[in-house]
Image (cartoon, rainbow, N blue to C red):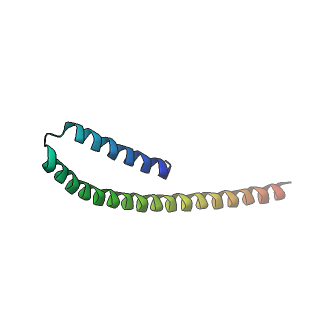
Amino acid sequence: MNKSKVIKGLVIGAAAGAIVYTLFATKKGKKFRKMMAEKGGDWSEVVKTKFNELGETLKQQYGKAKSTGSDILEKGKRNAEEVKHDAKYAM
């Protein structure tokens, strides 16, 4: 999955949640705006933390995939050389 698609999905989801929350909130006026400002600060920290965790996870997974791909490539090269060697001496 593309990293930008994941980030885009998270941002859109957060925005949609905020809109729905605002539409169905029961508190009014100053109290509601104050609560929203406080929650917004809390949520920004949560989002930052989750994005950092996501970034680290993606880096780790990329590293593992790259390593595995390199290992498979090297094994394929060795096997090709063995087949080439065997074919050379079989004739």
Q: How many numbered marks, from 0 up?
A: 0
Q: Position of residue 2 (x, y in %)?
A: 50, 49
Tell me: residue 24, above or below residue 64: above
**Which residue is pictured at 64% across the width and 58% down the height?**
73
Is 7 or 76 nearer to us in this picture?
A: 7
From this viewpoint, which residue is outermost toward the right? 91
From this viewpoint, which residue is outermost toward the front? 29
**Which residue is pictured at 38% across the width and 44% down the height?**
12
Q: Position of residue 9 (x, y in %)?
A: 41, 45
Q: Which quadrant would residue 27 be assigned to in this image?
A: top left
**Which residue is pictured at 51% across the width and 62% down the height?**
63
Q: Position of residue 50 (x, y in %)?
A: 34, 57
Quarter of the image that includes the C terminus: bottom right
Q: Which quadrant would residue 54 be assigned to in this image?
A: bottom left
Is 64 or 49 nearer to us in this picture?
A: 49
**Which residue is pictured at 20% across the width and 37% down the height?**
24
Is 13 or 31 nearer to us in this picture?
A: 31
Is 73 or 16 nearer to us in this picture?
A: 16
Q: Position of residue 77 (x, y in %)?
A: 69, 59
Position of 61 compared to 91: left or right? left
Position of 19 compared to 34: left or right? right
Position of 47 compared to 58: left or right? left
